[in-house]
Image (cartoon, rainbow, N blue to C red):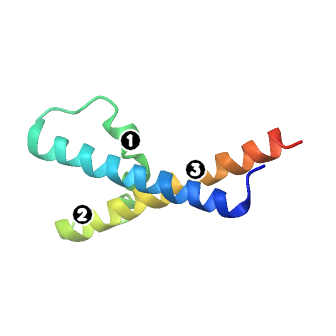
Amino acid sequence: MVSRKSIYQFATLFGLFGLVLAVLAHTIHFYFADITMPGYSVFMAPGMLLLSFFTEELSYKVKMILLLSGQFIGYAVISAFIAVIRRKLFSE
């Protein structure tokens, strides 16, 4: 059985994984690849969703903070939701 604390730990670790994935994908896309990478919009979806609520006149640093915050929150919420559903479906 998965305890509530381990769900939070799992969500935090998965959120950090999403954060690292976003940093790597953005770095590769921004500095190395002048073309659109396959899967970029899928990996960056939570951060892009958060950025869609703000204007384009924000500075680059603020955009990166919002993008990375959205990535962490999005991946953490999705993984916590999956862990809770898995616990409810497969608990004995």
- Classify mark 1: residues with Cα within 10 Å, few (<14), some (14-19) or many (20+): some
Viewer-nearest of discs 2 and 3: 3
Residue at the farthest right position: 92
Residue 8, quarter of picture: bottom right
Q: Report which residue position mark 2 lands on.
A: 56
Which disc is residue 78 wearing? 3
Q: CA distance from mark 2 to mark 3?
A: 27 Å
Mark earlier in primary sequence (1, 2): 1
Who is closer to the viewer here, 21 or 46?
21
Tell me the residue at 39%/64% (across/down): 69
Q: Are marks 1 and 2 in contact (CB under 8 Å)?
A: no
Horizontal and vertical percent for residue 43? 38, 41
Which disc is residue 83 wearing? none
Q: Amino acid at mark 3?
A: Ile
Seen in the picture, residue 71 relative to 34 is either above or below; the reply is below
Seen in the picture, residue 91 relative to 13 is either above or below; the reply is above
Q: Amino acid at mark 1?
A: Phe
Left or right: where 28 falls relative to 23 = left
Viewer-nearest of discs 1 and 2: 1
Q: CA distance from mark 1 to mark 3?
A: 13 Å
Left or right: where 82 falls relative to 36 = right
| Mark 1 element type | helix
